[in-house]
Image (spheres, grey):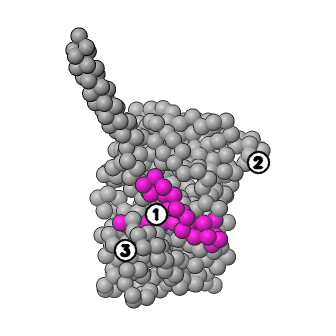
Amino acid sequence: MLVRFGKLQGIAVLLSALFLLLGSSVVAEAEPRETLKAAFVRDGDLWIRSGGTERRLTEGKQVSRPQWSFDGEWIAYQEGEETPNLKLWHVTSGNSLAVFAEGLADFQWSPDRNELAYTADRKLNTVRPDREAGSKTVAEGIGSFSWLPEGNGFIASSAVSLLPDGWERVRILKIPLAGEAETLYTLPQASDDFFAVGTSGFKYSPSGKWIAFLATPTASLSADGNYLCLLSSDGTSFHAVDQMLNRGEWFQWANREDTLAYIAGVGREVSRNKVLKTVRIPASGKPASYTPKGFVDQGFAWAGADRIIASRAKEYEGEGGIDSWPLPKLVEIRLQGNRASSVTEPPQGYGDFAPQFFPREQRLVWVRSNRNQADALISGRGGKHPSVWIKNIGSGRQYYGYGNWGEVLSVYG
């Protein structure tokens, strides 16, 4: 009997060990390896989070606007406030590079290689941080720009001046890396219905046939309204679709179809008259609206061909200050049938802003803030298993209730 009991006891031990091994594998599957990484600003310094750990890269530099290169090896960022400098950080080696860019306006990585383009004093320049050669001027007299989808050049707007008989007309330019620039289109003459002295950056549709951008009037007018425009890639067809705030992240193409989503509405306050719409190209009828009466949408991200995650709050028509405005939560909108369901329920006094969805990782990232302090949160699709990903990120510039979170957080995935 003693021998038989010993055998049973041994089997029980083996089964227990096997159960523990299987149990640990289940836990590992429930908590998948962290594949996204982030560059973020905390207390004015540049940090990165990668593989579950955080590392500070700068100290006492007043950093903003971090941007990842296409392969996640470099981070471009702005250093300083009144006279900002352009800096590049190589993540693997820890080496940094300063780019002389007096009068820095904008910068953007190539979509297919480690080449950074930037505008300074109306000049469009490029720099290759992995090569010893310095910056190269590509074009002059440039307002805003974006890389062409293939990375072989740029689409840009001309910088204009006020002449005795009125403002110059803005030209939309196609600038190859090798060859002469060409004018794709010249924006309409100023009128009661249209007035532009500049543009935003440019976004190509998935098919490459259409370009979306904002035509912007002078600064005081631009604070309240800008023209969302569509231009065919050959420059033969132009449409001013709607009016909206000058927020580049507030108009986005779907991933695979030529459907443009945007937040329409004039008025600089984000607490009223901000409606999420979509328009299919070629346009068939009026844009479709998805924001119910009594609410406003303050940011969004595509989460599939028929789904959008929006940052939605109750509309505020009162006379109180920003602290009186309702804070948003995230909702998922199914475009077919215009059905919305809650994704998050932030605690009292907090709102959820700036959603980003990463389809390959099936991860949703957003900012939770009480307008004084902010964290970056992460979850699975549809808000499943949310958790605080990065604590205490910067708040970015606040403008009439809108936080520019792109100034303090850039996610690579």
Image spot of residue 296 (x, y percent): 59, 42
Find the magenta span and give its range: 44-71
Q: Nearer the viewer, mark 3 or mark 2?
A: 3
Q: Is residue 375 left or right of residue 382?
A: right
| Among the two numbered marks 3 and 2 on one chain, the one whose residue lies closer to the N terminus | 3
Q: Residues within 10 Å of mark 2 (few under 14, many from 20)?
A: few
Disc 2: which residue: 321
Which amino acid does the dot numbered 2 rest on?
Gly
Image spot of residue 72 (x, y percent): 39, 65
Q: Residues within 10 Å of mark 3 (few under 14, many from 20)?
A: some
Which amino acid does the dot numbered 1 rest on?
Phe
Q: Label 1's element?
A: strand
Which amino acid does the dot numbered 3 rest on?
Asn
Q: Label 2's element?
A: loop
Q: Is residue 356 left or right of residue 226?
A: left
Q: Is residue 329 covered in magenta?
A: no
| Among the two numbered marks 3 and 1 on one chain, the one whose residue lies closer to the N terminus | 3
Could you give the CA–CA distance between mark 3 and mark 2, rounded to whole angstroms?
44 Å
Q: Which mark is residue 213?
A: 1
What's the residue at 55%, 64% (across, down)? 56
Vertical placement of 20 versus 206: above or below? Answer: above
Vertical placement of 146 versus 16: above or below? Answer: below
